[in-house]
Amino acid sequence: MIRALITVLALFMALQLPADAARDDSLVADLSEDTIGISTGFTGASVLLFGATDGEGDVAIVVRAPNSSVVVRRKERIAGIWVNADELTFDDAPGFYHVAASRPLDDLLPKGILEANEIGVANIAFSPHDFLSDSDEEAFRAALVRNKQRAGLYSETTGDISFRGDRLFRTRLELPANVPTGQYDVSVYLIEDGSIVDWSSSSLVVEKVGFEAKLTEFAFEQAPLYGIIAILIALFAGWFAGFVFRKV
């Protein structure tokens, strides 16, 4: 909260400066929080993104988590049973993707600019690991997006950006409980007359904290020992369950 108040005050002071003393930047943006901690009781988070422009214009915002490899499988019904058939791996699918804009994206920028900057879920440049026909690749891509949206990790609609006057803007980023960890890229675009005239980029870190963070760190740094402990716990749990049911 203190961080947000300080930044808002700085934005307000910048807007009051005379033209010859103003910054060269025509776009300033910041987050109410730049680190989100995930603990055992994490149920999601809400982050305020706000900023100011030096004049009239529209704003679009893209928030994306680091890319990862995702396997999409196609199911087929064989002898009355659904089984996995074909599959396709996408090498660079963002783990989380959110887009917001002050107007519909198609009204702001031409299709080529939206695709070049990957603004909008439909314009994410997924790279398939294997070659397929255009129709098959599009079907797997649609399935990937559908699965991510069902999990709350991709925008189903474009979020709203509200303006206070002609310069101050704000929007909220809602992070679900299953949000992946990593350093998120937050890109803010200032748009005028169908062109991007300025942009800014900042980072949002989503990380595990507390016991989960220690356990994850131990699993990566002491993998053999972690595996042995996991096996011992499983053996003990099996023995204990057998002992209890035998007594019953």
Image (spheres, helix red, strand yellow):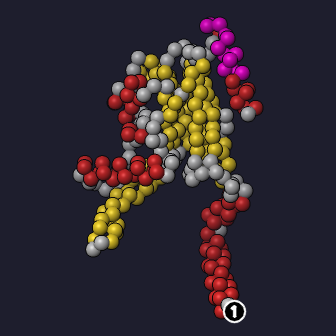
Start-end of magenta stretch: 9-20
For badge 1, the amino acid type reads Lys
Against 119, residue 149 (above or below) is below
The residue singled out by tag 1 in the image is 247
> Main structural element of the magenta stretch: helix, strand or loop?
helix
The residue at 50%/47% (across/down) is 153
Q: Position of residue 234 (x, y in %)?
A: 62, 79
Against 149, residue 199 (above or below) is above
Q: Position of residue 150 (x, y in %)?
A: 46, 51
Against 83, residue 154 (above or below) is above
Specify the quadrant of the image occupied by residue 164. Answer: top right
Q: Position of residue 105 (x, y in %)?
A: 41, 29
Q: Position of residue 96 (x, y in %)?
A: 51, 46
Specify the quadrant of the image occupied by residue 123. Answer: top left
Q: Is residue 94 visible?
A: no
The C terminus: image quadrant: bottom right
The residue at 58%/23% (across/down) is 169
The residue at 72%/60% (across/down) is 211
Q: Would residue 16 be counted in the magenta stretch?
A: yes
Q: Would residue 137 be counted in the magenta stretch?
A: no
SS of the residue at dot 1?
helix
Q: Nearer the viewer, residue 4 or 127?
A: 4
- Could you tell whether 138 is left or right of 44 in the image? left
